[in-house]
Image: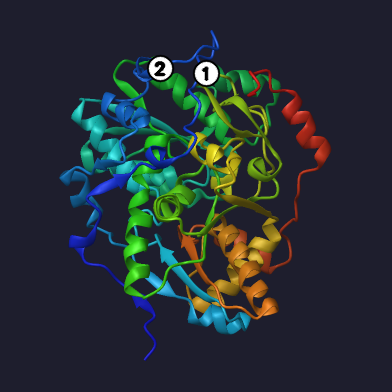
Amino acid sequence: MKNRKILLTEQEIPEKWYNIVHDMPNKPLPPLHPGTREPIGPEALAPLFPMELIKQEVTTEKWVDIPEEVRDVYKLWRPTPMYRAFGLEALLDTPAKIYYKYEGVSPSGSHKPNTAVAQAYYNKQEGVKRITTETGAGQWGSALSFACQHFGIECEVYMVKISYQQKPYRKVLMNTWGATVHASPTDLTEAGRKILAQDPDSPGSLGIAISEAVERAATDENTKYALGSVLNHVLMHQTVIGLEAVKQMEKAGEMPDIVVAPFGGGSNFAGISFPFLRLNLEEGRNIRCIAAEPASCPKLTRGVFRYDFGDTVGMTPLLPMYTLGHTFVPAPIHAGGLRYHGAGVVVSQLLKDKLIEARAHDQVECFEAGVLFARAEGILPAPETNHAIATAIQEARKCREEGVSRTILIHLCGHGHFDLAAYENYLSGNLEKHEITSEEIAAAIARIDTPAIR
């Protein structure tokens, strides 16, 4: 009988997070103060984050202990299963072996609780009463709402307006876990009012929502801010995924030639790929790690590497990253979690050093891939996940054309049960193909007024 499902026991949940910065040949450049444009230290982050998370943000230690209280919550859904995609292999008629690591079994239906639980725990330890955040598709907001409810912390979420309208049941899920949810931009913050004055019909963006959430935290001593992607500590928390995946691949008697994950700010890509990149850096293996992004927001494939703000208004430190410019507002595609103008600092440095790859896909191609996967494997993927599936399908078809067998691992980072309206649009032929033009990219990049990187 074919071994389709590769499982781990509770005892095999990782006890430490992996920090790839320790092994990187070129360490990331420092963040800069938004006003002075000089390098900043950890103390500059204190108004926004609890000190333990700040320590994790700047540490170069290779392994960071996962608190037992966090591992205990992880046990609600971890370890997550890995599957061999026999159905997809047969449908594609490929010699490739395809596996997928499935994070949709978490309470909120995605990989996001891996860091939400950790961040809520450290905030609770320091007596924080309220956490503000932004969310795109609603998966991060849902995860943080769940985590805050568990640790008894108030949660306030600024949800990108277009996603607030497209995905109303994500809002209901957040409300069920006790969170307050606002459609961003709002008139509740100076940042939101500024954006609305410029564009009353703004669909919102993650950059705008970040500005609002950061402003709220920075102006209230009882409130901290939590970010669902981009920052080093967030990416590190997600490595529980890849650390489990390495064990599961070993149990299957395989090791991937290619690891593929969707890319918005970097958390799901880092989560699955960094532990495999460790094998490249430590043992000289050659595992290709591919970040799959939307063609309508292609910062890795068509952006520039330079210092830029993480938010639209310019309240955050300047980060060295691949970016389309902090004022860039992506098209309202259904993969709301990938509509972010910049890339995480660590991922950006890895791409600059050619240690990872990137690929962009149009949303119609992605939904075509998602429907194909659902029919072959029975799981309806999130629109974000469809980008990774599209890349994996390309690689599997290449194996067929070349007559070679490669092992491909997909990060199936969430289910699409709250995205049925998007699938309905695709199946009825109403989903629009969208790819940003070179002129649009050039105009967005031209508005960046932050230091270039030499």
- In the rendered image, the vertical position of residue 376 relative to residue 157, given as above or below: below
The residue to which callout 2 is attached is 218
Q: Secondary structure at mark 1?
A: loop
Amino acid type at circle 1 is Met
Residue 153 in percent (x, y) is at: 26, 33
Q: Residue at x 29, y 19 (%)?
A: 222
Q: Residue at x 34, y 18 (%)?
A: 46
Task: Point out the residue furthest to the bottom here.
Answer: 1
Amino acid type at circle 2 is Ala
Task: Point out the residue furthest to the top here.
Answer: 36
Q: Are marks 2 and 1 in contact (CB under 8 Å)?
A: yes
Relative depth, front residue between 117 and 399: 399
Q: Looking at the image, can residue 165 be seen? A: no
Instruction: Report, in whole angstroms, how far the alpha carbon at label 2 lies from the one at label 1.
Output: 10 Å
Task: Quarter of the image for the C terminus: give it.
Answer: top right
Q: Residue at x 49, y 81 (%)?
A: 86
Residue 336 in percent (x, y) is at: 57, 47
Q: Is residue 434 left or right of residue 272?
A: right
Residue 157 in percent (x, y) is at: 43, 35
Relative depth, front residue between 319 and 380: 319
Residue 416 in percent (x, y) is at: 50, 61
The residue to which callout 1 is attached is 315
Residue 178, quarter of the rendered image: top left
Q: Secondary structure at mark 2?
A: helix
